[in-house]
Structures are given as C-alpha cells and as structure tokens.
Image (tube, coloured by chain):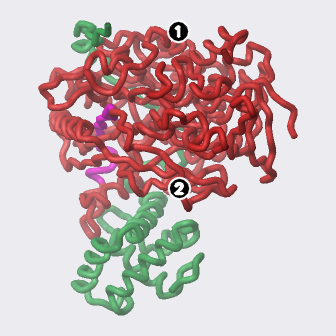
Chain colours: A green, B red
Amino acid sequence: MSAANELTSTQRDDLRTVAAMIVPASDEYKVPGADDPAIQADMLATLGRDTALVAQALDHLARLAGQPLAELDAARRDDVAKEFRATGGAAAATLVRVVLQCYYRDDRVLRSLGLELRAPFPKGYVLEQGDWALLDPVKARPASLRRTP
Amino acid sequence: MNDPVDVLIIGAGASGAAVAWSLAETKMHILCLDQGGWMKPSEYPSTGRDWEAKFYGDWSTSPNIRGRPEDYPVNDDNSPIKVVNFNGVGGSTVMYTAHWPRLHPSDFKVRTLDGVADDWPIDYDALTPFFEENDRMMGVSGLSGDPLSPPTRPPMPPQPLGLSGPLIGKAMNKLGWHWWPSDTTVATMDYEGRARCINLGHCTPACAQGAKASTDITYWPHAIRAGVELKTHCRVREILTNEHGMASGVVYYDKDGVEQFQPAEVVIIACNGVGTPRLLLNSVSGRFPNGLANSSGLVGKNLMFHPYAQIYGFVKEPTDSNRAPPTCLWSKEFYDTDLSRGFVRGYGIQFGRGAGPVFEAVASEQKGILPWGADHHRVFRQLNGHRLAVSAICEDLPEEHNRVTLDPVLKDGHGIPAPKIDYTIGENSRKMMEHGLARGREILEAAGATDICINNPIPWGGWHLLGTARMGTDPARSVVNEWGRSHDVKNLFIVDGSVFVTSGGVNPTSTIQAIALYVADQMKQRLANLFD
C-alpha cells in the first residue's frame, strides 16, 4: 500500500510504463510519449488530490500484472492494460486522465497540434463573425410562440 | 449578539444579489450573509497553463469534488444526475455557461394547457419588466426577433457565429428546423465596467476577463454602494422563530467559526433549490417540528433538475474548440407539446462549439473512441478541434418522490447536516430525452459528423435546482405565496429556484433573477403591511 501523498518507486515505474502504452512517442508527429521525463515529472509534481486514486489504480495494475509492468512481454502487457481499463473503475479513469492532462499541456505536444503555448488569458482568441445570412430562412418564419389563456 | 437588521438575506448568488440591489432603495438596514468569499479573477483557471486540469479538481463544478471550505457536501448517490453549483459571492453565476433563455409564457400555464403539474400563481407578464431590468443589470448580448422565443431587447449584439455556428446553422436549415443565436450574459462590448469578451473559451469555471456576468461584478457593486452590507464566510445553520411564529433571526458561524446570532425583522432565503430546503429542514423547533415553513410537507419535495440528453460528434471542418464561449445557439423547434411525440411538454436545444485538448482526450478515451497506443495520435488529430455538441434540456415535471432531505450522517465543515438527494428520471422525461437524442443525431448527421457519442443524462448536469419550496396560493399545496412569502412565517421570503412550480425546458437563471426582482418589488409595494 502506498503513502497517501506520494507514489512508491515501483508505482512510478508502472506509471511510466502505462503512460507510454496510452500515448507512445511518435516520429511521424514529432511528439514524445507520455513516459517522457518532463511529462512524468509534471505528473508527479501535480498529482495532488489525485494521488490516492492514482496509487489505487497502480496497485490494481500491479495485481493484474503480477510483476513490474515493463517486464511483461508486449502481448501480455496489452491484455493487462485492457483488463485494467475494463475493471479499474474511477481509479483507472483518474490515472488515465492524469496522464492525458499532463501530456496535452506539454509544449512539444501543443506545438505539434498547432496550438499556442500559452494560457487563454489575457490574450484570448479571435472569433470570426461567420455567415449571418444563414439565419435568413429562420427570420422568415412566422412568429409562433404558444398562446396562453 | 449582533445589532438587529431590517432585512437579512442568506446567500449572495444570483437571486440574493438581485433582491439586495432592488431593496437597497428602501434605505432599510440590509445585511447579506454568504458562506463563501469574494472571488479573485487573477486565480481563475484560464490565467494558467493548467487551465483544463483545474476543471477536474479545485474548479470542478461538483462541490463534492471541489471540496473547498465554502462548499457543503451533497449526498447524491441515489440520483443519476449529480448536483453541481458554486459557493461564494456570485454563487453559481461564477460557474455557469451564461446561456440566457427565459421561461416561455406557456411555461406558467402547464396544467391549463397540457393537464399536467400545476399552473404558476403568476404569469409571464408579471415578470416582463423584471426580465428586462435584469437583462440590463446582468448585461445581456443577443439578437432580437427570434420567432419561437419571448421577445427580448438585449443591450449588446450577439456573439459571433464563429466556425461552429455556421456548421450548425447549415444543418438546421437543411432539416428546416428553428435555430437562433443564444442570448448570453457574455459582454460582446465594453459594458458597465466590464470588458468585452476576448474568447477565453473556458467560460464555465469563471471568466478572468470579467466579460461573463456574475453577480459579484454586476449587482453586488451597485448594492454595496447603495448601502447593503455583505458579510462573507458566514454559514447560516438555522433560522430561529419567536413566540409569535415569526422569524427572529439566524444562527451562523462567522469566518472564525464562532457561533453568532443575527436578529432580523425580515429574513430572505436565496440558497438555491438544494441549499434552501436544507436550511429550512435544519430549522426545527417545537412550533415547526418538521422544519420551518413546512406545514404543507412540501419543503424539499418536487425537486426538478432538467435532465440533459447530450449527443456529440466530429466533423471534418475545424470547429471553435475552446476558443469561444461554449454555447452559441439554441433551438426551440421541440419546445412545445406535440402529443404525437409520445410525451407532454418539450425541450430546448443548446449547441456546443467544442472543447479543449485535454477535455477532448479525456472524454474521448472514456468513450472508447480514442485508442491507446500507436494510433492514438492519428485519431486524436481527427477529433481535437472538430467536435460539435447538441444537448436537449428537457422539462422535468414535478414529482414529490424527487426530493431533498437531510442526510443522517453526512455533515459540512461546521457539523451542519448535509442535503441528501433522492431522484429518478420520470417516464415522460425519458421519452423526451430519447426524442432529443434522435433529433440530435439527425442534426449531427446533417452536419456530416461521425464518431457519435451520447451522454444520457449528462451525469454532472444537476445545475438547475428547482421546485423544492414551490410557489402557490394554496398553503396546503405550496410553501410560499404568489409573491414569495412563506405561508407559515409571515416575515420569511424565498427568492431562488426553489419557488419554481414547473421547470420549463430552458436554463432558469434569467427567470430566477426576474422572480427575485419581482418579489423585491412586491415587498416594496407592501412595506406598510408586509406581514398581514
């Protein structure tokens, strides 16, 4: 069982392994995997209120694997992952969300997606007006608010 | 003991702020107590790179997940729809989508028109001037002339259609169905000290720009300048009564956790459809053994949520994603009763512009359309920035078994019993939701969307907390009268969504605030004989 506020070394290893299974590195898209050291460091630094559920998920994963996840062959690892996602409930969902929320704020990943490397505020975004003529057929409809006695 | 006040308002959210501002002109001594504090826009999520992650934690819409000291827990295990809210000055107007429809005139005559539920004791016309006053105070943007909605005169032009709006508009035109740019409380130009919208996108968990109206930046500055006193981090435990059966004041815990008594001539409750019955049920005495103002036995009963049936998909064209306010259009095509559909009443439709990358990844992985492994990147690029969403907001009929009671075990940080929700989605609502999903699918297909997913209901969709201290002329069948005064306690008023008799099929905040202003107006007109 893990401490309430941090992951054990074994859990961190499994987190790194499962993160790479969720989002592997890609040469095609020029992005790191979710096991990238900087992304892993972000996860561990910001686990906060999710620590207990993530630890619970990793304990469940360890039970399914029976040994460190990284030491399983690829086919067995995939089977364990499928079972983990199917049976892991809220804890597994939290782990996956933690992986994705850190991955999809990494500069390299956002750059690959063509997104700006910044918070929305204060610059905001420009929103085009769009084609207001599309509303003409609706404007042509007669007003038909339901009558009340 | 604190000095007595003329009027004590409990809750500084949508309705509490409106009633405080309206009553300020009487020059009475008005005090408002709120369990939360003032907001700090510099700390709002959209100011940081972790803006999306915060939505799953400190800025979750669920008080049970958020768990701030200002929040109270809600046992909603026995409900498929979970309660969401925000506690602080501004209340849930800090954390809402700013979508701003009004109830329709027909919504006040449900029994007469359709033979279900009950008619309201007031009609739309009684609220019309207060809708308009509220639109000015909150600062509404929109387009007049919607053929299927009550006439409005928004003081600001509508939000741009952006990329998503035309995709939806073309689909709706293809089907020949009504659509219209939503009225919203997002400022599209500088307005009354608020800066115009710059499309931060992440509107729901508070607007760092201040373009979205929340009562901490609309009503409250005016009310405080007019002399209303607002005390923060003060949580009311119960309302006390005197030997005449009148409210004498409230017991509350101040910011240091010290128990205080605040005497008052008039008490106004503005705590929403869950917080208000909780407070009344916690205010037990020898004279009121079943809770205050509860001789009808209806306090907490008839809870209405608005079940949301959501369907979404992904188009080839880029959508606005997170770079625009999340809702932009509505449809009233299926708002009114058509018995050939198999249900009474109807639903509004809200259209969503899209989502940010983290939300998209998390939601799509959960739905099983975003795989793990090598294909993850290709699929994510097809989904991200291509989402369109259709949500049917279904009129929930009042049913007494849907209710708020006190949890026998769960308590808040001050040891006050927490609310417990027992709620099931009724058969009529179920049919309506299925109809909404089928029509939503047609809309998405007309837009060319694929990978269609459903949330039925949206589980964390319990925004609209209505009906638990209903308004009526019969004390045996209602909790407050037609101008918001308790039938049982002549100096106790309720102004929040609790007083709704029926729910309509639209977001209720505009109507809640119009009712609060209407009740305040009634009080001002009756000051000489308020307790008769």
What residue is shown with label 2?
Answer: B407
In this rendering, the label closer to the viewer, 1 or 2 = 2
Could you say which is closer to the camera, residue A55 or residue A45?
Answer: A55
Whether residue B358 appears in this view of the structure is yes
Which residue type does callout 2 highlight? Asp
Could you say which is closer to the camera, residue A96 or residue B393?
Answer: B393
Mark 1 → mark 2, Cα distance in angstroms: 40 Å
* x and y percentages locating residue B253 in the rendered image: 75, 48
* x and y percentages locating residue B200 in the rendered image: 51, 38
Inspect the magenta stretch and tell me whether residue A42 lies in it.
Answer: no
Whether residue A24 appears in this view of the structure is no
Quadrant that contains the C terminus of chain A:
top left
Label 2 crowding class (10 Å Cα cut-off): few <14, some 14-19, many 20+?
A: some
What residue is shown with label 1?
Answer: B129
Q: Is residue B61 above or below residue B244?
A: below
- The answer to whether B518 appears left or right of A31 in the picture is right
* x and y percentages locating residue A144 in the rendered image: 26, 10
Any mark on residue B466, and which? none
Label 1 crowding class (10 Å Cα cut-off): few <14, some 14-19, many 20+?
A: some
Could you tell me which residue is drawn at 48 percent across and 45 percent down?
Answer: B404
Could you tell me which residue is drawn at 65 percent across and 34 percent down?
Answer: B12
Inspect the magenta stretch and tell me whether residue B392 lies in it.
Answer: yes
Chain hosting mark 2: B
**Mark 1 secondary-structure assignment:** helix
Q: Quadrant of residue A28?
A: bottom left
Picture mark count: 2
Chain hosting mark 1: B
Q: Is residue A81 above or below residue B459?
A: below
Could you say which is closer to the camera, residue B336 or residue B502?
Answer: B502
Which residue type does callout 1 highlight? Pro
Magenta segment boundaries in residue numbering: B381-396
Could you say which is closer to the camera, residue B519 or residue B288?
Answer: B288
